[in-house]
Each structure stands twice: as C-alpha cells, then as structure tokens.
Image (cartoon, rainbow, N blue to C red):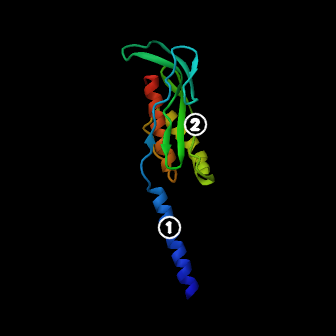
Amino acid sequence: MRTRVITGGVVSSLAVLVIGWQLGGQPAVTAPAEHATTSGSGTDSGGTSSSGSTGASSGPTGSAASGTFAGETVQTRYGPVQVQITVASGKLTDVTALQLTNSDGRSVQISQQAAPILRQEALQAQSAQIQSVSGATFTSQGYTTSLQSAIDAAGL
C-alpha cells in the first residue's frame, strides 16, 4: 500500500512537470540579425552571416529578391533558435536552421526532429504561416518568429 502511494506521488509530480514544461511562456525576440547586404556577404556583430542581392523589378508588386537572409535569433526557454532562408527570384527555396534549442539533450533531440518538418511546411507555404510541431512548441515558435524576420529582411 505504501509503495502505491509513493509511486502515485512520483507519477503525479512528473505529470505536473511535463505539463508545465509544455505550457511555458512565449519566446522572447532578441535584436534583429544583420540583413542581407546589397551584394557579396557580411557578418554582423553576433557572428551570423548573411549574403545576397536584390534582383530587378518583377512587375507591379516590386522587386524579386534573391540571396540568403538570416532571421533574428529568438531566445526560448530552452535556448536560442535562428533560421536562414535562401531566396531565388522572390521564391523561398531553402530554410536552414542556424541555431536550435540547446539547453539539454532532450531539447536538442526535440528540435532536431521538428526542424525538418518545419522546413518542409515553410517551403510549401512560402511563408511563416505554418503549424507548430506537436511536442516542440518552443522550437516551433522560435522557428516561425525567426523565419518571419528573415522573410521580412528579404522583402517577401
């Protein structure tokens, strides 16, 4: 009987910890990363690189951006998240995770599983309007925030 009470208390405590972990606050956004340079490449004071150039006008909607653009580094409860996008003729062609959550082994594992899913969704949507990955809320929020800042830097 005593073993059941102790086991029940441990299970209840673990459930509270897991729920609290998944229901944590929104990520805080740090200062924006260096935007792409007009031509060539550059490195900002935070050590992130960005390169690219803007293309010629592509009709009434404005210019068709091309190049590589780093998004903001977003601080989450489990570490920083930052993505970089590659744009060709105004179209999102690649999304690369420069930083993913890294506070412990579990957060690294979760981020590594979520990143390819988030990348695929972003490429399909051609925007940051993508679904969060279940179980990777902080990574998903940081990823989409950084992705949106990179898209904004590209002028898309």
Q: How many numbered circles are shown?
A: 2
In the image: residue 60, left or right of residue 66: left
Number of other residues with Cα within 10 Å of mark 1, as a class: few under 14, some 14 to 19, many 20 or more: few
What's the residue at 50%, 62% (across, down)? 18
Which mark is on residue 97? 2
What's the residue at 52%, 50% (across, down)? 136
Tell me the element at label 1.
helix
**The N terminus: image quadrant:** bottom right
Q: Position of residue 131 (x, y in %)?
A: 45, 44
- Amino acid found under the numbered disc labelled 2: Ala
Which mark is on residue 98? none
In the image: residue 4, left or right of residue 126: right
What's the residue at 49%, 46% (across, down)? 76
Tell me: residue 39, above or below residue 113: above
Tell me: residue 4, above or below residue 151: below
In primary-sequence order, the first of circles 2 and 1 is 1
Query: Which residue reaches farthest top?
Result: 56
Q: Position of residue 117 (x, y in %)?
A: 55, 43
Tell me the element at label 2.
strand
Q: CA distance from mark 2 to mark 1?
A: 31 Å
Whether residue 127 appears in this view of the structure is no
**The C terminus: image quadrant:** top left
Tell me: residue 70, above or below residue 56: below
- Amino acid found under the numbered disc labelled 1: Ala
Q: Position of residue 91 (x, y in %)?
A: 49, 24
- For the residue pair 55 and 50, the one nearer the viewer reads as 50
Query: Which residue reaches farthest bottom?
Result: 1
Question: Which residue matches tag 1?
Answer: 15
Query: Which residue reaches farthest left?
Result: 60
What's the residue at 43%, 14% (across, down)? 58
